[in-house]
Image (tube, rainbow, N blue to C red):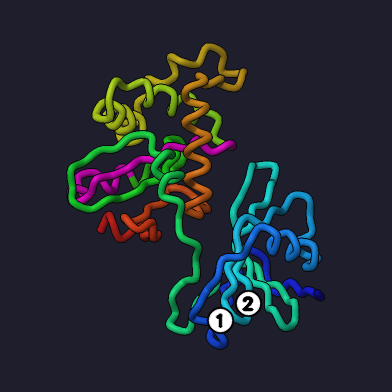
Amino acid sequence: MKYKILAILALCCVLTSGINAQERNLSKKELIDLKKSVKALNKPRLEVKEGIDRGNVYFLKLETKTKRGSRLMNAFVDKKSGDIYFGKGYDKDGKLISFPKDKKVIKDGISFTYGDGKKDLYLVTDPECPYCVKFEKASKGKLKDYKVHVILYPLPYHKKAPAMVEWIMQGKNDAQKRERLEQIMVENSKIYQKLIKDPKVPFNTSGKIKIMVEKSKKAMNELGVRGTPATFDEEFNPISWGTLIK
């Protein structure tokens, strides 16, 4: 198969014709053969996780390994030409083409939950992220309709975030963890600093929190998070967090 990369990551390709209504999941052997035959996929750091036969195209879920960790992405392979397109795809009705989300992976990544609203809201946040802080301050008192499932993830380039997450998760229950998050992100408390023995040495989180962060990372990948804060509805569809605070 020849290949041609027309865009990387950000391409929005609209697939409007020749879609077979009878979609079929590709077998492991088919995924291996496809990786071998499409040169753009034949890279050590790239793994073809899943695939769907959509008639004229193969829709693929890929995992690429970078210095910042693993990242999920989608690609489409044109059966006839062998051309490959990286990025998002939409069907003829303008609906985003996507793989079903793994609910277990996402729910395993929840750090704590607060609120008793009737609608579920999934929030991916980093306590040191300035945009996450902005969201917390702006959304205070405005999420009463939701049960908010918080997925805490300290971004690698935020040096204080690990200690912040550690201190938040030392809360005895979900309510106390929520209070601690607000203390740091809304009230600008520095109380977490008591956990930092040497500011010059990277903070070493406890084993329990390391496991939690790894689960958070997997949930983020499954949700397709590209930045924080990120919010999703009960079906794991992204919601603009700006609409939540209006």
Residue 146 placement (x, y as % from top left) = 22, 49
Residue 11 placement (x, y as % from top left) = 61, 71
- Is residue 149 shown in magenta? yes
Q: Are marks 2 and 1 in contact (CB under 8 Å)?
A: yes
Q: Is residue 155 above or below residue 199?
A: below
Label at residue 57: 2
Q: Residue at x 46, y 60 (%)?
A: 100
Report the amino acid beneath label 1.
Leu
Q: Residue at x 53, y 35 (%)?
A: 214
Q: Which residues are magenta?
A: 136-156
**CA distance separating discs 2 and 1:** 9 Å
Residue 151 placement (x, y as % from top left) = 40, 40
Q: Nearer the viewer, mark 2 or mark 1?
A: 2
Label 1 sits on residue = 15
- Of the pair 205 and 211, the residue shown nearer to us: 211
Secondary structure of residue under mark 2: strand
Q: Is residue 75 above or below residue 19?
A: above
Secondary structure of residue under mark 1: loop
